[in-house]
């Protein structure tokens, strides 16, 4: 054990000021002022987990949490990192045999009981406290959100019976030949597809008719293969036309097409052989997705509904040079409407009862010719470049943005749109 040095200023003297509820601030101050001298007595200064493990027999997880909490820079971080009252009581019991801890244990015991009482008084206990702390510090919210996403992924993968390591989409928008509308090429990739439950059908992608944005009665957006072939997909032979051989593990397994109303879903059937393809890539051309000259301040370009649990979700969107020069990408997450109900997407940033508080950082990709590479996917740029060339867009330059999300939440709407900085209503 290291030799103790001169006493340092108390935690109350050195703690940064921060907005906190009075009771939480009082509990945090008492705990920090009592924990620091206790750890000094047990593990020296600076405290290290290995000294707590060897000195009083704490397990690695509890010892690490205690040391991390002691190093916290604010009350909010301290309360978030602090072990539960049960873990703190273990520390108390293990410390009773250490003579150097006897003088500081009573104050620490009182602080732990006050902490337990605080959690008992909050509906939802520790989760409610962390949610309140997350409103003050983004790092706390991001950590809790990542833990929740990871737990959701494990549960949903088991329930769905399948998952994917990486799922990516890339949408390229460019002026249509009619000079009035914007067309799109969209590429979907599934990398590392896994079946957990034998006999589970695996949905790959759905093509569905959608009312035309022009609002003309009966008009439909036309979805067809990138080479401009016939629209739709009523059979497995038709479905093959949407797959990009350069981005797939060949040969492709037998495909099935499930028709439901105006939708066609491509499937790997329950009897599709193992191992599943390591790479599957589909691409489509969509005509007339948006007006070339939008007259509103915000435009929703795409609503995604994730049906495949995945470890990493990558969404990319590209605008041809000169298209919507003042456009700024926006992302929002929403609960879907009632079954069969098409709801108007609310603008991102506006409070709404369906809005979910999920983070989605957007990065702008380097400008210039070519497609930016994607870490962990060696053929990302080459496959997208091949699709653009086959679609007749190889000579165009695009500016783009990327959003990467670990463990995305399935079955919620991910709304991707643009806000126009030069619009009077912005």
Image (cartoon, helix red, strand yellow):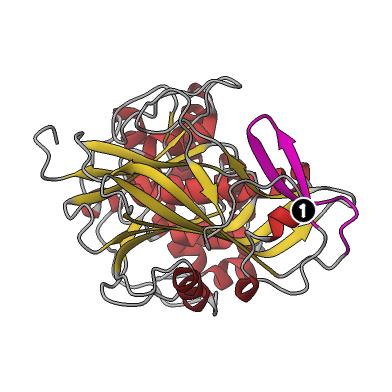
The image quarter in which residue 234 lies = top right
The image quarter in which residue 348 lies = top left
* In magenta stretch: residue 280: no
* In magenta stretch: residue 257: yes
Percent across and percent down for residue 363 are 32, 61
Give the residue number, with chain letter if any, for mark 1: 236
In the image, taking residue 258 as reference, residue 412 lies left or right, namely left
Q: Which residues are magenta?
A: 255-273
Percent across and percent down for residue 246 are 61, 76
The vertical placement of 215 against 98, above or below, is: above
* Observer able to see residue 103: no
Quarter of the C terminus within the rendering: top left
Percent across and percent down for residue 74 are 30, 50
Residue nearest the observer in this picture, 182 or 35? 182
The vertical placement of 122 against 272, above or below, is: above
In the image, taking residue 252 as reference, residue 413 lies left or right, namely left
The vertical placement of 355 against 69, above or below, is: above
Residue nearest the observer in this picture, 218 or 193? 218
* Residue at image coords 50%, 71%: 390
* Residue at image coords 76%, 46%: 257
* Observer able to see residue 120: yes
The image quarter in which residue 2 lies = bottom left
């Amino acid at each position: 054990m290291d030799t103790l040095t001169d006493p340092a200023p108390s935690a109350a003297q050195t703690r940064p000021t921060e907005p906190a509820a009075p009771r939480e601030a009082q509990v945090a101050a008492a705990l920090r002022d009592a924990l620091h001298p206790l750890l000094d007595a047990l593990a020296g200064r600076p405290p290290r987990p290995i000294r707590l493990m060897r000195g009083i027999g704490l397990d690695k997880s509890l010892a690490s949490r205690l040391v991390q909490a002691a190093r916290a820079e604010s009350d909010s971080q301290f309360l978030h990192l602090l072990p539960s009252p049960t873990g703190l009581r273990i520390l108390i019991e293990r410390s009773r045999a250490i003579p150097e801890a006897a003088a500081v244990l009573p104050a620490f015991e009182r602080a732990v009981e006050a902490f337990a009482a605080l959690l008992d008084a909050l509906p939802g206990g520790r989760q409610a406290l962390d949610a309140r702390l997350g409103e003050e510090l983004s790092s706390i919210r991001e950590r809790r959100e990542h833990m929740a996403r990871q737990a959701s992924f494990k549960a949903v993968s088991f329930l769905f019976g399948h998952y994917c390591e990486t799922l990516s989409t890339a949408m390229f928008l460019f002026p249509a030949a009619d000079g009035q509308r914007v067309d799109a090429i969209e590429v979907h990739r599934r990398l590392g597809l896994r079946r957990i439950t034998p006999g589970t059908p695996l949905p790959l992608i759905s093509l569905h008719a959608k009312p035309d944005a022009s609002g003309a009665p009966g008009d439909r957006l036309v979805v067809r293969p990138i080479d401009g072939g016939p629209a739709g997909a009523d059979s497995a032979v038709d479905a093959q036309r949407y797959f990009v051989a350069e981005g797939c593990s060949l040969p492709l397994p037998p495909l099935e097409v499930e028709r439901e109303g105006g939708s066609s879903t491509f499937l790997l059937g329950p009897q599709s052989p193992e191992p599943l393809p390591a790479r599957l890539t589909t691409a489509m051309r969509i005509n007339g997705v948006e007006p070339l000259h939008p007259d509103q301040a915000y435009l929703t370009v795409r609503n995604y509904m994730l049906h495949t649990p995945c470890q990493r979700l990558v969404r990319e969107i590209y605008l041809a040079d000169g298209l919507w020069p003042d456009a700024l990408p926006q992302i929002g997450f929403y609960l879907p409407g009632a079954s069969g109900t098409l709801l108007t997407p609310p603008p991102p940033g506006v409070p709404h009862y369906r809005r979910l508080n999920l983070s989605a950082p957007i990065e702008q990709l380097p400008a210039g010719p070519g497609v930016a590479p994607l870490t962990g996917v060696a053929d990302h740029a080459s496959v997208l470049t091949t699709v653009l060339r086959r679609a007749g867009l190889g000579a165009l330059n695009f500016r783009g943005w990327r959003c990467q999300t670990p463990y995305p939440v399935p079955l919620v709407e991910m709304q991707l749109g643009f806000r126009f900085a030069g619009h009077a209503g912005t």
